[in-house]
Amino acid sequence: MKLGLGLYRHMLDREHLRFARQNGATHIIVHYVDYFHRGSGDNPRGDQPTGGVRGWGYTSKGRGYWTVEELTEVRRLVESEHLVLHAIENLDPAHWHDVLLDGPEKAAQLEAIQQTVRNMAAAGIPTLGYNFSLAGVYGRAKLQRARGAAEGLGLAGAMDHEPMPAGMVWNMIYDARRADDPAAPVETRALCSSDELWRRLGDFLDAVIPVAEEVGVTLAAHPDDPPLPQVRGTPRLVYQPRLYQRLLDRRPSPANQLEFCLGTIAEMSEGDPYDAVETYSAQQRISYLHCRNVRGRVPQYHETFIDEGDVDILRVLRILKRNRFDGVLIPDHTPLMSCPASWHAGMAFAMGYLRALLQVVDRESRRLRV
Ligand SMILES: [Mn+2]
């Protein structure tokens, strides 16, 4: 098991990479889509993206895929600080909105994603994390319920389910002209049935997994956060632990893996996080883990510091070790600490805790072997 740190795009610099190393990280996961860019003024840069009425802001198409040159530049930067780039996390909604929405550009966008996967292989980046979701990460409230009244995200019962405006998907605006028109309709292609969304996921896997297999890239699926069956009138795919199996079984392949989000799994109304870790790590289906803790389940939960929630992280790491999980763990997000560097302090605390527990399970397994 390897310890990593996730960095947002605006953190791609030497200072943040050194911060990762100083925390004991050997691996880096990069969010290459910028959630803190134009029009995302509600996303303060020192926190995880939270989002207001414009979601996580605007995104623009560019070439429609990521080039070998730009991806190589990211890998080289990470390696220049003696770290390994394990994954790019999340596709740009501007590159695949019609794959999610089954819109007119779907065929061209599936080809563009195939190109991105080939370019990742050429750039030496082994993993693509993605979240096949229409509404995306939406609707969580800021709550002061973590230890010491620290602010974290969660759900406190009812959520606003206002439909997405046309031009928005995955909680980002891909078509500003339509989304900013006060008279524009809602995104009707997002208001589909659950079966239809599974069909769209199947089309995506059928198009992308063979290319990923061929070039040696792994796709890793994040579950729906928050894990509710519907958000903003749109269906969701993986909102119970057992639905991860449905995603894997839809296209069995070594390239079809999971970006296993422990916090989201623990928030789900059914199932048990230890069983889920056991089930998917025993199948060798986990590429990397988001390690975060929570208290409660939907529709009443809040994110906590990593050592104070419902999940016994040591128990999770022992299961992973027993099943010979050899992927990467990263902290996911943390509550904000009361200091001038809230994000850094929260991450440093989570990294220190994870590093200590990793040393414990490593020593335990060595003792068992002698
Ligand atoms: Mn996560």
Image (cartoon, rainbow, N blue to C red):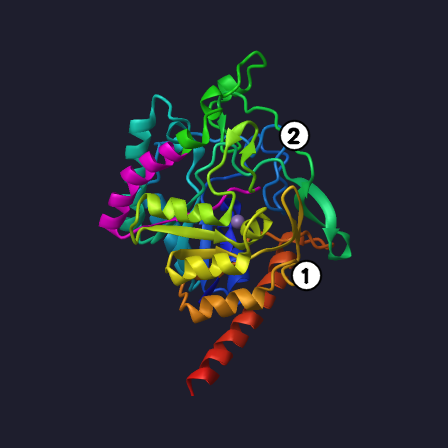
Quick check: can you spot residue 61?
A: no
Quarter-wise, where is residue 227 in the image? Answer: top right
Q: Which residue type carries mark 2? A: Asp
| Residue at the outermost top position | 183
Give above or below for 180 relative to 254.
Answer: above
Quick check: can you spot residue 277?
A: yes
Magenta range is 198-226
* SS at badge 2: loop
For label 1, being within 8 Å of ligand 1 is answered no
Disc ID at residue 308: 1
Q: Which residue: 37% across, 32% down?
A: 200
The mark that comes first in sequence, 2 or 1, is: 2
| Residue at the outermost bottom position | 370
Instruction: Name the residue beneath numbered marker 2.
Output: 160
* SS at badge 1: loop
Q: CA distance from mark 2 to mark 1?
A: 28 Å
Number of callouts: 2
Q: Which residue: 56% across, 48% down?
A: 270
Q: Position of residue 273 (x, y in %)?
A: 54, 57
Q: Which residue type carries mark 1? A: Glu
Q: Nearer the viewer, residue 297 or 119?
A: 297
Give above or below for 52 relative to 155.
Answer: above
Residue 310 relative to residue 358: left or right: right
Residue 259 relative to residue 57: left or right: left
What secondary structure characterizes most of the magenta part? helix
For label 2, being within 8 Å of ligand 1 is answered no
